[in-house]
Image: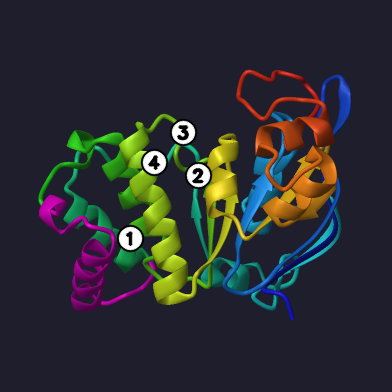
Amino acid sequence: MPLISAAGLARTFQTKLGPVQAVRGIDLTVREGEILGFLGPNGAGKTTTLRMLTTLLAPTGGAATVAGHDLATDPAGVRRACGYVAQSGGVDPQISVREELVTQGRLYRLTKAQAIGRAAELARDLDLTDLLDRRCGALSGGQRRRLDIAMALTHRPKVLFLDEPTTGLDPGARADLWDLVRRLRETHGTTVFLTTHYLDEADALSDRLVIVDRGVVVAEGTPSALKQKHGGSADASLQDTFLAITGRRATPTDTTPVAV
């Protein structure tokens, strides 16, 4: 049984100008321990899909399960099984890294002693130990993203959703975050569901890719298989392959107003 399964997952927004079909019917599966790259142009429905799979947004059609928990009938079970790192993060700049991690643990109903212990464990795993007493607002971009991920891992989720986690990071910080994602899978068996506009990132990290456009899946497979099929060669760039599949760029400069 796949760790994540979606069939016909859809979301329509009601606006003053009428209904907007942000996601028209997503079908996908994600295996346990897999790093899945979820790609598409701006407006393809990527973030809307992530928000549905993490129970932050109710679907208007279709069905999905995460770690055996149904989105519609067991949203609490879905939340226990997943961690979510949004594009903007969510740390309090006025408190220390230690306070942020301990507070997150308490929100997950750990005792104070358990939360302190878990904070120290996460700090060791994500190279934050030397930063525990630093104010969150004084962290670099890469350090903040590691803290965002640490917070999402507090309850030891089976699957980690990362929504454009390296946007705005310098090359060194991006490389560090790539190493962290690989380490999470290799050390803890964490399944990672990744959206990114950086196709080199998707190529380097993903076991398999799902490409969406205008709210539906238009291609899926391993990076090499997609390059061979759509780029003409296993040595083709993922950029050229993506363009052949969608006819549009994956960069944030694509402003086609199709969906959220």
Q: Please tell me whether mark 3 sits on a helix, a strand or a loop.
A: loop
Marking on residue 167: 3
- Seen from the viewer's position, the closer of residues 115 and 177 is 177
Q: Nearer the viewer, mark 4 or mark 1?
A: 4
Residue underneath mark 4: 174
Which residue type carries mark 4?
Answer: Arg
Q: Please tell me whether mark 2 sits on a helix, a strand or a loop.
A: loop
| Residue positioned 26% across, 77% down in the render | 111
User: Is 121 covered by the magenta stretch?
Assistant: yes
The quadrant the N terminus occupies is: bottom right
Q: Are marks 1 and 3 in contact (CB under 8 Å)?
A: no
Which residue type carries mark 2?
Answer: Ala
Residue underneath mark 1: 104
Residue underneath mark 2: 86
N-terminal label among 1 and 3: 1
Q: Nearer the viewer, mark 4 or mark 3?
A: 4
N-terminal label among 3 and 2: 2
Left or right: where does residue 95 sit relative to residue 243?
A: left
| Residue positioned 52% across, 71% down in the render | 80
| Residue positioned 72% across, 75% down in the render | 2
N-terminal label among 4 and 3: 3
Question: Does the rendering let one see residue 13?
Answer: no
